[in-house]
Amino acid sequence: MPQEPGYPHAQPGKDGPIQRRAGNGDLIAYTAEEYGVRKDRGHGLVKPVGSSGGLLFLAILASLFAGGVAYGLARIAVDGTWEMLGDIWWTIPVGILVPLVAWTSFAKERRAGKLRRTRNLPRPVE
């Protein structure tokens, strides 16, 4: 348990440990690598996805979107309707960046989960 003597506590990162509540209500210090992706509400309308399973689902969904963009570009090339690209050019950078961010977030949370399991820490909920 983190409260026991001799337990390896969080090593300060660049900005020191991140103090967050765990699922059981205890306040625990996480390093930035152990914390993973943001799990708080962040003053937005939608609560961010913070579990590795949810991030995997979003990454797969974003990859399907990128596949649709690639298919659309292939259809434009085959049909020769290049003038259409003036209206939908923005889908190309979005089709590249959204899956890249989604897979990066999944990898970051997956790595953080492994580090938390190594130190026997619960998952932060905020």
Image (cartoon, grey):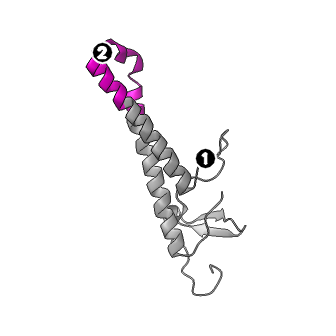
Q: Amino acid at mark 1?
A: Pro
Q: Disc 1 vs disc 2: Cβ atoms closer than 8 Å? A: no
Which one is in front, 70 or 87? Answer: 70
Q: CA distance from mark 1 to mark 2?
A: 37 Å
x 65%, y 63%: residue: 20
Horizontally, is 70 left or right of 115 in the view? left
x 40%, y 31%: residue: 68
Residue under circle 1? 48
Magenta residues, start to end? 70-95
Can residue 98 be seen at all in this image of the molecule?
A: no
**Element type where label 1 sits in the image:** loop
Q: Position of residue 76 (x, y in %)?
A: 31, 20
Q: Position of residue 94 (x, y in %)?
A: 42, 32
Which one is in front, 6 or 76? Answer: 76
Neighbour class for label 1 at 10 Å: few (<14), some, many (≥20)? some
- Tell me if residue 66 comes above or below residue 3 in the rendering: above
Q: Position of residue 8 (x, y in %)?
A: 54, 80
Q: Amino acid at mark 2?
A: Trp
Query: Dividing the picture into quarters, in which one does residue 71 lie?
Result: top left
Looking at the rendered image, the quarter that the C terminus falls into is bottom right
Residue under circle 2? 82
x 38%, y 35%: residue: 67
Can residue 88 be seen at all in this image of the molecule?
A: yes
